[in-house]
Amino acid sequence: MTIKDIARLSGYGVGTVSRVLNHHPDVSDAARERVMAVVRQYGFEPNSNARHLKSQTLSSVTVLVKGTQNMLFADLLERVQSLLLDSGEEVFVAYLDEDADEVTYAIQLCRLRRPKGLIFLGGDLELFRSRFDQITVPSVLLTNNAAQLGFANLSSFTTDDSAAAACVVDYLVSRGHTRIGLLGGNLSSEQISYRRIHGACEAMQRHGLTLPLETQYEPCRFSLPDGYAAAKRLLQRQPDLTAIFCMGDVIASGAMRAVRDLGLRVPEDVSLIGYDGILWARYSVPRLTTVRQNTEQLAARGVSTLLKSLHYDIAPVHEIIPFQLLEQESVLALNSPHLPQKG
């Protein structure tokens, strides 16, 4: 009996059967039970020699993507994969839920797949702090700063989220906005959204303004439906807000629809500003003003450092990649002498 026979009898694909037989974690309980029932019924025994040989070699570079709807990570992943493939490296990609434990998942993958290196797209520093010492292969974290963790095999490349958020507030205040809402992420001190929120609040204080989080901040996941629902809650609670700073462009996309469904307009009634600079921001109506993270440089520096770490004993690298505020069409200047008339 072969794996193809098991696939035919179980009703699952060859890839699913292979993952079950190799004890991969990314298989449903139903699939695992059905495949193993066929294995037990027909007495299938895998080729132990092939498995032994495979266990002695390191496999592909593994990329762990935290969040299935984060369009910034989709852009980063495409660039990372292209750079790795151009360098002759095989790539295995694993998608995790936004709230998943990426470090525990990586530990399991290291035992099962023996990757030669890991690239994390997004990550919770508290999880790295508590369990990353169980990972020994060269690793890179993109979009969060691991410099203070002190792991010899973990490099990181990120945007200065606090400075970028302060830049957003400075921009909004310079255009007459003093009632600013914040949308997205959460207040965990180890998350990137916390640094953006903290940077925005500090900038508001510097301008002599207040930003009470209990009323002018609404947390949510990085997805279109969550951005939509959170924007509705925020605007229904605080209808006097003139601008909303969204922690991600995908959240801003959902918020833009919510503003419209509440009978309001962007930017005439509510100005929106995002974070990431994904391609969608250039084609939305209106075009979204946003903070552009340099995905080209993030990917290039991350992959280059990982490849060096695979072949040489180098010290970890931690870099801050410059950002850019893209001024487009979604912010109205309230202090302009030529404001459009509201219909």
Image: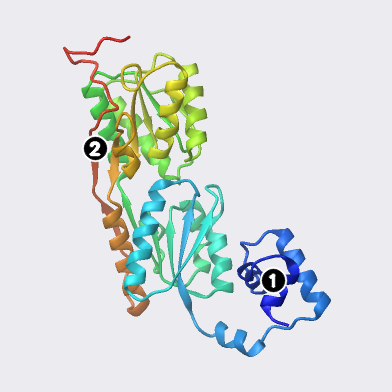
Residue in view at x 32 percent, y 40 percent = 162
Instruction: Indicate the position of residue 122 as horizontal and vertical percent values.
Output: 43, 52
**Closer to us: 177 or 314:** 177
**Circles 1 and 2: CB atoms closer than 8 Å:** no
Residue, disc 1: 7
Residue, disc 2: 326
Amino acid type at image mark 1: Ala
User: For this view, does 163 lie left or right of residue 56?
Assistant: left
Residue in view at x 54 percent, y 54 percent = 96
Label count reads: 2
Measure the C-alpha gap from mark 1 to mark 2.
51 Å
Q: Which colour scheme is used?
A: rainbow
Q: Check the image and report above or below for 43 versus 191.
A: below
- Badge 1 crowding class, 10 Å Cα cut-off, few under 14, some 14 to 19, many 20 or more, is some
Helix, strand or loop status at disc 1: helix
Q: Check the image and report above or below for 57 versus 255.
A: below
